[in-house]
Image (spheres, helix red, strand yellow):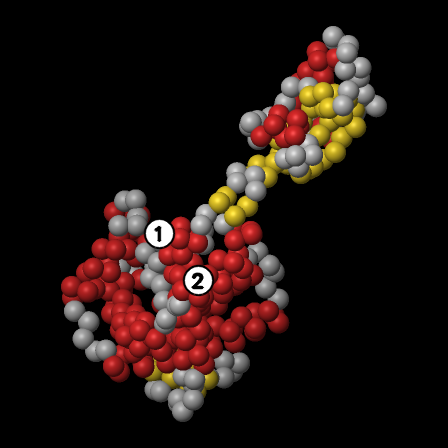
Amino acid sequence: MDIEKNRYASLVALVLAITWFCLLTPVQAAPPADKGDETMGHGSAKDIVVAKVNGKVINMDQLMRTMSEISRTKHGSEEVSPLLAEKIKQEAIDKLVIEELAVQVAGAKIKDITPEQLDGKVQAIKKKYKSEDAFQKYIQTEFGGIDGLREQLKRLLPLELFISQEFDAKVVVSDQEVQQAYDETKARSFVTDEFVQVNDLLFFLDATDPEAAATIEKTTKSITEQYSNDPSKFPSEGAFALQKNLPLDKLKDKSLYEAAKGLKEYGWSAPVNVDGNLHVVQLVGYKSAINKSLEEVAPQLKKQLRQQKLQELIQTWMSGLKEGADIEIMDLTS
């Protein structure tokens, strides 16, 4: 996937999906919270208990950060109505409860995290930032400094190690599964024809007229300079017929295809005589042919299939975490 800049508030969910990849990706730090976010009517947000998970407190500060993350990543600029805000709150609480249960299970089995392991993770994160200032700004905004970052890593590293130990060895991807995945996706991903798409202008001119080429050039220049290079905006008044976004067939439209494929995007061809009719094409879309064998893409497919299976195992594990747990959700309406 193309790397999206996720904030560290999503780290645990990402770890549960078996990847530190986004953690190690530079993120855009959120602006410092207003003081109104830090203190509330009943005191500091960190002192207000939202839930207890086997006695471990989840506070209002955690809830607010998680709600903000869910709102931003799932709802973007959508207006947050009271109904949506309540939905986001319930989703955030459930997410925090599951995360806490996962951390508790992992922490019970993996207790010793060495300073060297923490240092390695800090350095891996730091390397993804262009400057020391950018890194310091990030950790100061998100964690209050390097000590806060190390505390979070100390909490989450056991979860990473636990998942690696408990689930990695259980994931097996066979050659048959790789072959099946290749067969199912090759027509759209691995073996595709060259694709050429154009705006086709058919000019109503005599192809034998020596002035026709100059007339066409004058028209395309006018479209480019006066009409934002958009032929549909040009008042053609019967000068030409336009077919927009026309995919060309390599065999049936051979002359136009060859004229278009060498153009720059939104560039114009010279006039092309097709059965006595003069055409000019403007390239609007091009994709080169792809012809990748199973052997070439097998490592990529195997990795994808492995990640899918691993995530399914983890999700199954997560779905059973609440069973037998002592979970108390506080009434926040009073």
**Total marks placed:** 2
Residue 3, placed above or below residue 121: above
Identify which amino acid the numbered label 1 is placed on: Pro
Residue 226, placed above or below residue 190: above
Q: Which quadrant is the N terminus positioned in?
A: bottom left
* Residue 152 percent coordinates (x, y): 29, 67
What residue is pinned by disc 1? 26
CA distance for labels 2 and 1: 33 Å
Residue extending farthest to the right is 238
What residue is pinned by disc 2? 178
Identify which amino acid the numbered label 2 is placed on: Val
Dot 1 surroundings within 10 Å: few (below 14), some, or many (20 or more)?
many
Q: Is residue 208 visible?
A: yes
The residue positioned 42% from the left and 70% from the top of the image is 309
Q: Helix or strand or loop: what does disc 1 sit on? A: loop
The residue positioned 37% from the left and 80% from the top of the image is 101
Foreground: disc 2 or disc 1: 2
The residue positioned 53% from the left and 70% from the top of the image is 88
Residue 228, placed above or below residue 66: above
Relative placement, left or right, of 223 versus 148 is right
* Residue 132 percent coordinates (x, y): 25, 47
Q: Helix or strand or loop: what does disc 2 sit on? A: helix
Q: Quadrant of residue 175?
A: bottom left
Residue extending farthest to the bottom is 324
Residue 243, placed above or below residue 9: above
